[in-house]
Amino acid sequence: MDVYEAVASRRAVRRFSGEPIPRETLERVLSAAARTPSGANLQPWHVYVLTGAPLAELKKRTAERVAAGDPGDEREYQMYPSELKSPYRERRSAAAEQRYTALGISREDRRSREAAVAANWDCFGAPTALFCYIDRDMGPAQWADLGMYLQTVMLLLRAEGLHSCPQMAWSVYCRTVAGAVLPPPGLILFCGVSIGFEAPTACHDRIDRAPLAETVTFIDG
Ligand SMILES: Cc1cc2nc3c(=O)[nH]c(=O)nc-3n(C[C@H](O)[C@H](O)[C@H](O)COP(=O)(O)O)c2cc1C
């Protein structure tokens, strides 16, 4: 698969078939993703791959917390600035609107919206999930390295016919994830990434992007 095609066909898929992914495929993707660049080659990512019974157990434990109305663990990092200013605020609402319209969920239908959010903690039915950690004392540059790593993984997954959904939502229940993966002390969970084959019933929402001139400035003669 051509890189442009991998980039264009990657999207956050939120309905997976349960079809298992062969271990060799995951090893091929993660071995190739190890070539991701990072400042001073620190390679600051720590990745745990969960599948089978351990993932099923994690989903079950998290679902119990969600069902009990548990608001989650003390956050280890701020997902978004508390006051999201323009144009980010508008982009966030536009993306939510596009997503819920594609799902046929109205603004007033709070219960369906909550169910759509809760599907995060079932990994949207995916048979495999990665959990990406970073050392607590790493700074913004190393967090950027982690983002590059995750995008590399997600593009390589496309080359294998697989889809993914990155999920900061898992950081809400980071202690339950830690109970499943037992990370050494000093690591922060950045996000989970659900991985699988897209379900035939998945909705084909395509979230817009800002026009190039809004985010890129060419300075030339
Ligand atoms: C770091 C990161 C965290 C994300 N967390 C979540 C999440 O918790 N749940 C979710 O459904 N989507 C999550 N997303 C997916 C974004 O909502 C999605 O990438 C964005 O709306 C653009 O849509 P697209 O990826 O389908 O083009 C996350 C994406 C990134 C990059």
Image: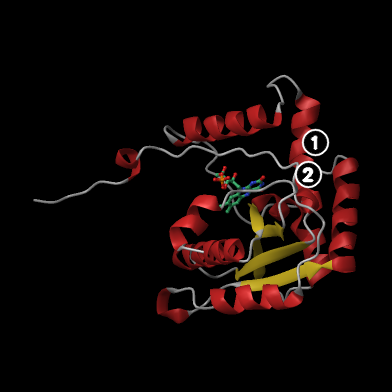
The residue nearer to you, when weighing 108 against 11, is 11
Q: Residue at x 55, y 70 (%)?
A: 137
The residue nearer to you, when weighing 173 against 163, is 163
Graded by Cα atoms within 10 Å as few (under 14), some (14 to 19) or many (20 or more), the crowding at tag 2 reads some
Q: Residue at x 45, y 39 (%)?
A: 209
* Residue 28 to residue 63: above or below: below
Q: Residue 56 placed where, x, y %?
A: 88, 60
Residue type pointed to by label 1: Ala
Q: Residue at x 17, y 50 (%)?
A: 219
Q: Which residue is mark 2?
A: 119
Q: Residue furthest top?
A: 108
State left or right for residue 195 relative to residue 59. left
Asked if marks 1 and 2 touch (Cβ < 8 Å), the reply is: yes
Q: Which residue is mark 1?
A: 115
- Compute the Cα span from label 1 to label 2: 6 Å
Q: Residue at x 76, y 63 (%)?
A: 128
> Is the shortest distance between ligand 1 and the CB of mark 2 under 8 Å?
yes
Residue type pointed to by label 2: Ala
Element at label 1: helix
Dividing the picture into quadrants, the one containing residue 87 is top left
* Residue 71 to residue 171: above or below: above
* Residue 9 to residue 95: above or below: below
Q: Residue 71 placed where, x, y %?
A: 79, 43
Q: Residue 39 placed where, x, y %?
A: 42, 74
Q: Residue 193 placed where, x, y %?
A: 67, 59
Dividing the picture into quadrants, the one containing residue 173 is bottom right
Which label was assigned to residue 64?
A: none
The residue nearer to you, when weighing 95 against 67, is 95
